[in-house]
Amino acid sequence: MEDYEALLDRAIENLPDIETTDARFVIPDPKVFIEGKTTVLDNFGQIVSVLNREPDHLMKYLTRELGTAGKIEGARAIFQGKFPSNVIKSNIDAYADEYVICSECNRPDTQLVKMDRVMMMKCAACGAHRPVKKRKATAAAPVAALEEGKEYEVKIEAVGSKGDGIAKVAKFTIFVPRAIKGDVVKIRIKKISGNIAFSEVVQ
């Protein structure tokens, strides 16, 4: 019986060649608008094309991270609930970091392949291959809900377009002013609106 490394090497060798490009990798800014009680990502198809990933894979990631339900309608994605464009953008950027950008050469010329139930990423630009990282749990224990005025310890998972840190607790996306990705900070919740919360850092 072949060992895991041999099977992995064979799977990677059998992958189709990926064309590399020197063009600058730019993810389009999400075109988001609110329609009733839903959020429409109008250029979902364009974003998927640039990321070079399956639409269902990105959609599953976004609905999980936003803590909501959603569907793909043509070139658009529709999410239940109201989400600002910077929240959508930060989650798309996080998806690219996790599933598209090579951690060795920072190029997007990668492909996903499943091997023995492990998702692997192969880079055509530098030849690197690695398991896709599992999402690390936040520093705080999971809670069912946030409450305004209460304090929590969170880990900053991304930075929004306006410079605020973004943390996740249960279904909530929390904006933390002046926080840097990777920081673990103590915060106080100032305001909650749906699945979105705004906070201040507790000194």
Image (tube, rainbow, N blue to C red):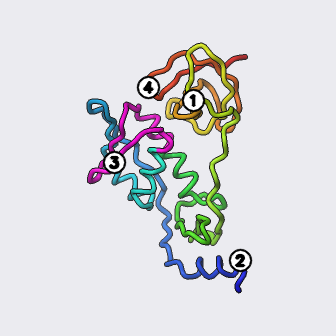
Q: Nearer the viewer, mark 2 or mark 1?
A: 1
Q: Position of residue 113 (x, y in %)?
A: 54, 69
Query: Which label's residue is closer to the chain start, 3 or 2?
Result: 2
Label 3, label 2: how far apart the Cα atoms are: 38 Å
Amino acid at the residue labelled 4: Gly
Query: Which label's residue is closer to the chain start, 1 or 4?
Result: 1
Q: Nearer the viewer, mark 1 or mark 4?
A: 1
Judging from the image, what secondary structure is the residue with disc 4 in? loop
What residue occupies the far bottom of the structure in this picture? 1
At x 59% / y 26%, what residue is drawn? 176
- Report the side of 12 relative to 88 (left or right): right
Q: Is residue 67 magenta-colored?
A: yes
Q: Which residue is mark 1?
A: 144
Query: Which label's residue is closer to the chain start, 2 or 4?
Result: 2
Q: Which residue is mark 3?
A: 71
At x 58% / y 38%, what residue is drawn? 158
Q: From which residue to which does the magenta span run?
A: 64-91
- Report the side of 105 relative to 84 (left or right): right
Q: Which residue is mark 4?
A: 194
Label 1, label 4: how far apart the Cα atoms are: 14 Å
Residues at circles 2 and 4 in contact by the CB criterion of under 8 Å: no
